[in-house]
Image (cartoon, rainbow, N blue to C red):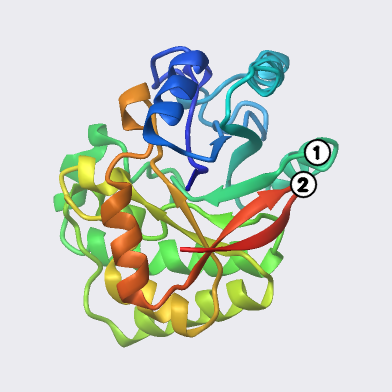
Amino acid sequence: MIDYHTHTYLCKHADGTPEEYLAAAEKAGLTELGVSDHCPWPSGYDPRWRMAPAEYPIYEKIIKKLQKSRSPVQIKYGIEIDWVPGQMEETYTNIAKIEYDYVIGSIHYIEDFPFDNPEVLPVWQIEGKAQWVWENYYQLMLDYVSEGKFDIIGHFDLPKKFGNIVPESEEISRTIDKILEVAADNKIAIEINTAGLRKPVKEIYPAFNILQKAAKKGVMLTFGSDAHHPQDIAANFADAVKLAKVAGFTHYQSFTQRIPTPIPI
């Protein structure tokens, strides 16, 4: 089993040493541990929650040191990039220079609204705000997957983090369907991310109906804990595996130099 969504202290909102994350992966019996901290580009974007560009060499050293360990767990070199409309060229240019095993593509902002930040919880109570978030979130995601420059969609329905479940909407449902179709065409995987179970929503990302759709449309699958603490590594993966099977998945993907290899679940 793999855990491809994990972080380091460089993001400023995680703790523990890289060695502690690796030890937790060994204890969990993982075959692969992917390190995928928040990308520092574009420069100056969201500096409270990610490493600065000048710190990136430290990140590389962390990866290389873990890869040189004698651990039975294989270390994969990943990164989590954000969709910043109109500012992606710097990100794409920089990540193209680096031999990643995989790239996670995530969305944490809609315009200037950091919808998954607990500091903005009162804003969610404004009438119509939830509908605005969900409609715009999935439209941004459709734009993102259409460019096809990453490998795994991160926490597909992240705006539900605080319990604001996606509203019933034919338009939103059609957009989700289109996202999954484009993802399948562009060979972009979806992750089962167990972090939602540790958040107020108490539900895995994405919701079961989205996983079912993804399986039917032939979207590839990975697993991630979104670990920000060593104890999060592989958290609730038994639940994730069961959910994947019930949704219709038979395989998950192992990535090496951004090439996926299917592994039976």
In the image, what residue occupies the spot 42% across and 85% down?
A: 174
Callout 2 environment at 10 Å: few (<14), some (14 to 19), or many (20+)?
Answer: some
Q: Nearer the viewer, residue 1 or 40?
A: 1
Furthest residue toward right: 97
**Which amino acid type corresponds to the residue marked 1 in the rendered image?**
Glu
> x and y percent of residue 130 in the render?
24, 61
Asked if residue 204 lies left or right of residue 81, the reply is: left
Asked if residue 207 lies left or right of residue 264, the reply is: left
Q: How many marks?
A: 2
In the image, what residue occupies the spot 66% across and 51% down?
A: 255
**Disc number at residue 40?**
none
Q: Nearer the viewer, residue 171 or 149?
A: 149
> x and y percent of residue 198 in the render?
22, 40
> Contact (CB < 8 A) between labels 1 and 2?
yes
Residue marked by disc 1: 99
**Disc number at residue 257?**
2
Instruction: Judge whether residue 48 can be spotted in this image.
Output: no
Rendered view: 222 above or below 77: below
**Which amino acid type corresponds to the residue marked 2 in the rendered image?**
Gln
In the image, what residue occupies the spot 67% across and 33% down?
A: 41
Instruction: Judge whether residue 88 can be spotted in this image.
Output: yes
In the image, what residue occupies the spot 15% across and 44% down?
A: 200
> x and y percent of residue 232 in the render?
32, 31
Asked if residue 68 lies left or right of residue 238, the reply is: right
Asked if residue 117 lies left or right of residue 55, the reply is: left
Rendered view: 120 above or below 165: above
The quarter of the picture where residue 151 lies is bottom right
> x and y percent of residue 33 in the render?
54, 35
Q: Secondary structure at mark 1?
A: loop
Rendered view: 235 above or below 220: above
